[in-house]
Amino acid sequence: MMGRLGVLSLVACVASGCVDDRPGPMEEPPKLDCEDFGRYGPVGTTFTLPGPDANGELYVPDVQKRFPQVDWRTLDRLYIPAGRYTLINLGNLPDRSADRRLVITNLGGQVLIHPNAGSKQGYLWAMNGGSNWVLTGRYDPVSGTGHVDLPGHRCGEYATSRERYGILSDDIFLSGGHMGLGIGDAHSFEVEYLEITRAGFAGLRINRAAGSDGKVPPLNDIQLHDLYIHDTASEAIYFGSTQGAPTPLGSRVKVYNNRLVRTGTEALQIQNLGDGAEIHHNVFAFGAIDWRAAFAGYQDNNSQAQVRGGRIRFHHNVFVGGAGSLLNFFAQPEPGDAPLDVEFSDNYFADTLSLGLWFGGTTGTDARFLWARNAFRGLDFGYQAVYPTSRDPEVVLAKADTIKSPITLKENQWEGARKLFAGLTGGSGTAGTVTATGNVNGPVTPLTFVSTGLPEGTATRQLERWAARATLAPGTPEVTYAPGALVMHDGRLYRARAQNTNKVPPDNTALWEALPLPVDDLRTAPGTEWAQRGIGLLDVAK
């Protein structure tokens, strides 16, 4: 939207009859898709943490104890000074009220968390404790956050946002156990406008441990949005626990406007969702690119989600690229959870080597599931390349026999010779507890982005992570790359000049051509069917 000063200046000019096409006394002309400044209100009281020590560390596992002079009940801004940090640990963050949240942000430039090559440190960046705090790298001079030179994707500048966020975590794939950011024992917080890349495991990990009484506190009221997480060894976002009951219930969790791109395993892994959870307008792209040599077998879906109880919605998301299922979905209520009422609507699913959707877990007849107006394409079976005993599922959606709930499939569209669901011969009918109405089998228009930055015509499944061997295939055979093959290695993009086997790209320039980094402007191309339906990232302020 146009800023208020821009509107008033234009009105005054029109009223006085002036004609002047210059932008006026401001740094740049207003852009129609920019958010207004002032998201977090005036700056208020502030405190600046010390910068990196001689080892590059900011190690404050108990901020309240370390800085007793600070009134942690009323502090408005907690600043992290610009600089390069090899490690950050901020713990015992305060519990705040929802009407006066603590905003944590960078000051004076970029906060770069980047370890030294060869370091043996156990983690990269940890934030622990508290509630009603915000972690942001957003540039907002009115709210006193971020920095003018580091706007990220503000005003739709997705194509130039790489390394231009106020806070950037780059783990350089240092350790298989590292998270780009790990958040523990906190709830009711918000994370936005960060870039996380080359995490040794997950980009953003959020969980909550059991207390001394054996009970697990909830992960309620969490917002994750406007994040750019890319080129991770495993998941981009890993939320909650898969360790079995009891797990931390995530009610009113909001995940939206994120780019989760080129992940070794799932782009999104989110579980333990409860009432009011909503996942919408995200792009989960190029998931499971390390499917031949991931840390374990079958960790190769585009995304994975698990729900527990209440009203939960997944809508207007883009899921593109995977090896197993585009969505590995589970319902697993725990004692005391509300009946499930889950809706997947207006999502776009495309390009994997096996199943569109797997629905597992255990539910009774009190739960309800609706899939409406979703689109599926690019389900071209090729899973046997690593798992030779696998078979074409011949359906778009499949479920476990332990799912006893009524399921409605309404006005979905899919292309190809597969059935929508086993037992259905077309787009309408019943099969057990599944009722289908108005679904259409026919061509699905491919969703296109403004710009991926990949070579023109690149198919989603053409891009994989370079591997010397397919360690998950029987006999761990060497991987041979054909001319034109596209691979990511150490977060960089390469194209094969000639057929080659076991030749590391940066060390073999005669065989591998280094290409420019992907730009990841993953907004849905304007004017297309999908943009008109509001699916994916859109070219409007949110």
Image (spheres, helix red, strand yellow):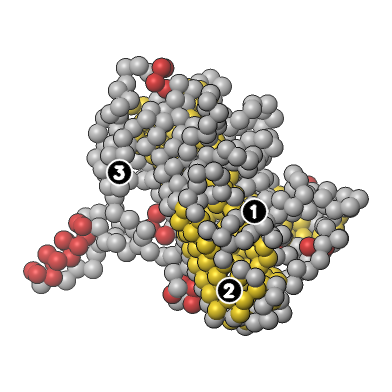
Give me the residue at 86% from left, 60% from top: 388
In the displayed structure image, the side of residue 277 where residue 453 appears, left or right: right
Q: Is residue 106 visible?
A: yes
In the displayed structure image, the side of residue 248 where residue 99 appears, left or right: left
Instruction: Indicate which disc, 3 or 1, sits on the residue closer to the N terminus.
Output: 3
Give me the residue at 24% from left, 40% from top: 42
Q: Which mark is residue 435?
A: 2
Instruction: Indicate which disc, 2 or 3, sits on the residue closer to the N terminus.
Output: 3
Q: Which mark is residue 384?
A: none
Neighbourhood count class around disc 2 (C-alpha, 10 Å): few under 14, some 14–19, many 20 upward = some
State the separation of the CA atoms marked 2 and 3.
Answer: 46 Å
Q: Is residue 168 above or below residue 116?
A: below
Return the residue at label 3.
40
Specify the quadrant of the image occupied by residue 74.
Answer: top left
- Residue 68, position in %: x, y? 35, 16
Give me the residue at 42% from left, 49% from top: 252
Q: Could you tell me the amino acid type at mark 2?
A: Thr
Q: Is residue 374 visible?
A: no
Q: Which mark is residue 361?
A: 1
Between 167 and 163, the residue placed more toward the observer is 167
State the separation of the CA atoms marked 1 and 2.
Answer: 19 Å
